[in-house]
Amino acid sequence: MRAVALLSAPWREPSLALAAWRDEPFACALISGGTPIGPGRARWSYLLRDPDQILVLAGDAAVDPFAVLAALIGPPAPTDPAGPPFQGGVVGLASYELGDRVEPLGLARTAWPDLACARYPALLAFDHHDRRVIAVGRGKTPAAAGARAAAALTWLDAPAPPAFAGRLCDALAASSGEAYEAAVAGVVARIRAGEIFQANIARAWSGRLAAGAEPVDLLERLRRDSPAPFAAYLRLPDRALVSNSPERFLKVAAGGDIETRPIKGTRPRGADPAADRAQIAALAASAKDRAENLMIVDLMRNDLARVSPPGSVKVPELFKVESFANVHHLVSTVTARLAPGRTAADLLRAAFPPGSITGAPKVQAMKVIAELEPPRGPYCGSLFWAGVDGAFESSVLIRTVGFTRDEDGWRFEARAGAGIVADSDPRAERLETEAKIAALARALTQAAPGDPAR
């Protein structure tokens, strides 16, 4: 599909355009908001549906998932320089346990697949800067590409169902805070004994959506009240994923330049501007948080070096404080370049799962995590797009809710974790998980604006 066509339409919010297709398997929205990450990062959102090929691999599938992914992406094809960064290709969900295919650890699985991907010959790109929508179509001929772009424009005409007005969930059930603190204390002891340097340990919150509420309603509330750079929705058969992630995992430009931006170090937002500034200053000055961040920077440097020419891995930015709706984070940037003959699928194999949500050394940290947590499924995995031109963008699936539909409606689980190091305080780490889950909890349990029950 080497031909590409672009058509324009008036602006519409991408989450509203998605609502009409919320129940369609492999309908997907990638929504950029919140703090921009790099030039143009907050400019583009995407709506995708009607894939021409689907790939779903369970944990016991006897194939190389990265080789199969590379085949699905296919060889590079041209794009239109006037169009958006993503002009068709693959969107995929890599669950955390896909890491068991990189380093076999015998990880238990959830009912989520290790890898679920779809290839899309058409999409809608939402330009937040110029306030317009661009339909992208691909085909073997210009006429075929134009027909696909025109068909994609009609997605905007579908009537959206009304948004749910009440509380999405009456209450969240949280895993034990005392048990979490005990787990943190145990990890600190193992670190001091020399087994590992750091491990990211998470807690779970679960619940059930109210009758009539849909996962896409959570996406819209998060977009409005707590925008994030890597918000996303993905629908699978009887499952749905809603993510409000602030964290980039891996980015690859069409020319082969790589960037990763690990997050380690968190403070809650202050109650007023003075308190907020104090939290920023405390995070920036924290030796504990800087050490935690640096360990993961070194881990990511090592991962990127596996697929990069010697000397190409750089760290242009260390310990930058970035502010989001609910928290401040300490963020660093690592860059590299793909070696000749290497692809984004090779990079994904080299770096998965993300170092910021495993620990250091990565393999031993994963073993510790497996002892202390049930299987993670999509949490701490990655949602990515792989363009036809070789470009790649992906998030770390934190601030993410996994939904499963049963005879009683939608049940869900979300998790939040903290990076545990030698001087971690169990209570402080528990409070950090509660700060990280707060925006999701509010969106799930508070009434929508204008709801009389508010």
Image: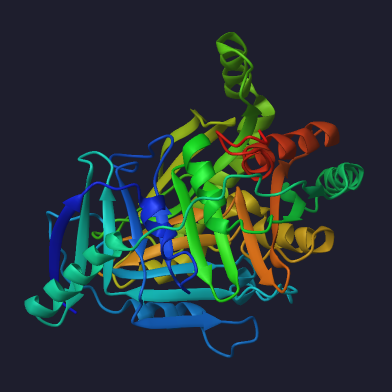
Q: Is residue 451 left or right of residue 10?
A: right
Q: Residue at x 33, y 63 (%)?
A: 158
User: Residue most toward the top?
Assistant: 274
User: Residue most toward the front?
Assistant: 452
Task: Decide if residue 246 is in sight here.
Answer: no
Res 389 → quadrant: bottom left
Q: Is residue 70 above or below residue 258?
A: below
Q: Is residue 146 left or right of residue 239?
A: left
Q: Position of residue 97 (x, y in %)?
A: 65, 70
Number of on-image labels: 0
Which quarter of the figure is the N terminus placed in?
bottom left
Q: Position of residue 117 (x, y in %)?
A: 45, 74
Q: Nearer the viewer, residue 453 or 295?
A: 453
Q: Position of residue 320 (x, y in %)?
A: 48, 29
Q: Is residue 9 above or below residue 75?
A: above
Q: Nearer the viewer, residue 24 or 139?
A: 24
Res 390 → quadrant: bottom left
Q: Residue at x 28, y 39 (%)?
A: 39
Which quarter of the figure is the C terminus placed in?
top right
Q: Residue at x 69, y 59 (%)?
A: 412
Q: Nearer the viewer, residue 148 or 328?
A: 148
Q: Nearer the viewer, residue 441 or 176?
A: 441
Q: Position of residue 64 (x, y in %)?
A: 51, 84
Q: Is residue 202 above or below residue 1?
A: above
